[in-house]
Image (spheres, rainbow, N blue to C red):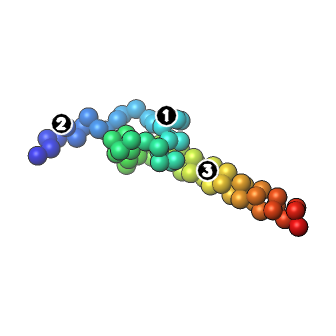
Amino acid sequence: MIRQDDDKRFLSTEHLGTEAIAAFVDGELSLVAERRAQAHLMACPECRREVAKQRQAAKRLRDSAVSYTHLRAHETD
């Protein structure tokens, strides 16, 4: 049985750092670190906003790479 004290050690009061946010969005955190980040995000709207911004930036980067690849493919036609 998990005691209440055991749960508290996984709830960070510090905000997620830039590198942690990027690693979270990219799926590069260990299982334990990911769970800790998820627990923090449930309680922290500021970090949720930062994660949303990082996800948007990653999507724009992926979309621009696809567009660039598409343009380059048509240059050879």
Q: Quadrant of residue 68?
A: bottom right
**Is 74 situated left or right of 57 in this image?**
right
**Is 25 situated left or right of 74 in this image?**
left
Q: Where is residue 6 drawn, in percent x and y?
A: 19, 37
Q: Quadrant of residue 4?
A: top left
C-alpha gap between disc 1 and disc 2 = 25 Å
Mark earlier in primary sequence (1, 2):
2
> Could you tell me which secondary element the residue under label 3 belongs to?
helix
**Is 55 situated left or right of 71 in this image?**
left
Number of other residues with Cα within 10 Å of mark 3, as a class: few under 14, some 14 to 19, many 20 or more: some
Residue 17 badge? 1
Number of other residues with Cα within 10 Å of mark 2, as a class: few under 14, some 14 to 19, many 20 or more: few
Type of amino acid at the residue the image marks with label 3? Ala
Is residue 14 visible in the rendered image? The answer is: yes
**Above or below, 60 relative to 36:** below
Q: Residue at x 22, y 41 (%)?
A: 7
Residue that carries the numbered disc 3 in the rendered image: 58
Residue 4 badge? none
